[in-house]
Image: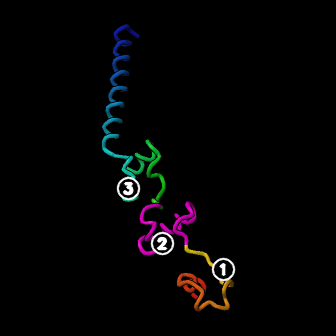
Amino acid sequence: MMRGDRALGRKLGRLATTLAVVASVGVAQQYDCNALMEWELWPDVQKRFCCDHGGHGCDPWDCSYQLSTHAISWLPTKGEWCCQHRALGCAPQFDCNAGWSNWEAGWSKPKKEWCCD
């Protein structure tokens, strides 16, 4: 290899490194991975990027989002996943033998629905 070929190879290597840095900075500026509110609504490409570059958006569901209204606002698949993987949004479990003698007056509506359906 000639001296000029080596110099050209080094220049091309530095150029490739510079282009890679510029490209990664450009992509990073496209997504705010710290804007965690409602991340499950992010496009898949943003979820992948933020998962790879910050650990956000990796799960298929944000189990904190709409947790207080999960019974009416979550899809069944989200409820199943969040219950199994994060122990959130699970259907209440009741002991249907406890308080049986006074169930009409003593049980809550959710317990009646759980035990009587």
Quarter of image, res 7: top left
Q: Image height check: is 88 above or below 7?
A: below
Q: Is residue 85 magenta?
A: yes
Rendered image coloring scheme? rainbow
Q: Nearer the viewer, mark 2 or mark 1?
A: 1
Q: Quadrant of the C terminus?
A: bottom right
Find numbered disc 1 in the image and state the secondary structure of the residue it sits on: loop
Residue at image x 36%, y 55%? Answer: 42
Quarter of the view holding residue 49? top left
**Residue that label 3 marks:** 37
- 29 lies above or below 117: above
Residue linked to disc 2? 76
Q: Amino acid at mark 3?
A: Met
- Dot 1: few (<14), some (14–19), or many (≥20) neighbours within 10 Å? few
Q: Secondary structure at mark 3?
A: loop
Residue assigned mark 1:
95
- Closest to the camera, between mark 3 and mark 2, is 3
Q: Pinpoint residue 43: horizontal percent, then vertical percent.
A: 35, 55
Mark 2 or mark 1, earlier in chain: 2
